Image (tube, rainbow, N blue to C red):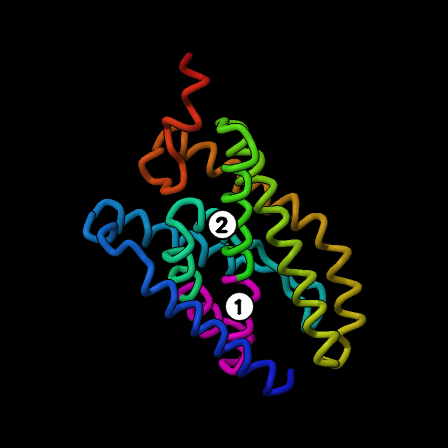
Amino acid sequence: MPAAYLWGGAILYALLLCLALLTASWSKVRDSDALHVYVSAIVMVTTLWILRGEIQAGLGFHLLGMTLLCLMFEWQFALFAASLVILFTTWRGPAGWESLGINALLMGALPILFTRVFLYVAQRRLPHNFFIYIFVNAFLAGALSILLTGISSAFLQAMADVPHQGRIGNDFLQVLPMLMFGEGFLNGATMALLVAYRPQWVATFHDRWYLQKLQT
């Protein structure tokens, strides 16, 4: 990919990290239990990224788990977690360090920010309901986030005129529907378990909003 795209992605991601650093609620990390949950989630998502499939050279795929991180820890801490995941997988994987910024932007920041905006709209336009939170904000948001990531990646490669991007893009689009279902199920099922047994681990879940109707 041309250097202009790589540098542009790195600069934009660095700016988002600075914004996250300035707006994050740092009081949360003082809780040792919450910190343990945060580290465990990073390890889980890192493992998810390592378990990647590959159809051909240059075409690898894996689930993201970014919607899960955003719903559990809010977008700022999700972005920090994504940075650590991508740093580790870049070190262990085939991607070069020069593509770190653009990869972090596409596979980290984009699905995280989409999930947060999607949650914001749902909280204001849809009824506050447990099932809406699980099926819309977790399952549907997760599926749409990986779709957005895939389409954005293919579009960026087309704009940059990456060699063989047409063939790779066509093959990836065939896999994308299966990835959407897998991503949606991963986020939806995990969030359903968390809000049922450990709602205190989920920063964006509010009992008074989503459980009020179930209790009445």
Of label 1 and label 2, which has the lower sequence position? 1
What type of secondary structure mainly makes up the magenta span? Answer: helix
Query: Is residue 42 on the magenta stretch?
Result: no
SS of the residue under disc 1: helix
Q: Is residue 207 above or below residue 148?
A: above
Q: Residue at x 66, y 67 (%)?
A: 153
Q: Residue at x 47, y 68 (%)?
A: 89
Residue 133: image location, x then y, percent: 51, 34
Q: Please give the count of numbered marks on the rendered protein.
A: 2
Residue 4: image location, x then y, percent: 60, 86
Kind of residue sitting beneath label 1: Leu
Question: Contact (CB < 8 A) between labels 1 and 2?
Answer: no
Residue that protrudes farthest toward the front in the picture: 124
Q: Is residue 25 left or right of residue 41?
A: left
Residue receiving disc 1: 105
Q: Is residue 102 above or below residue 112?
A: below
- Of residue 108 and residue 8, the one placed in the foreground of this image is 8
Query: Is residue 105 on the magenta stretch?
Result: yes
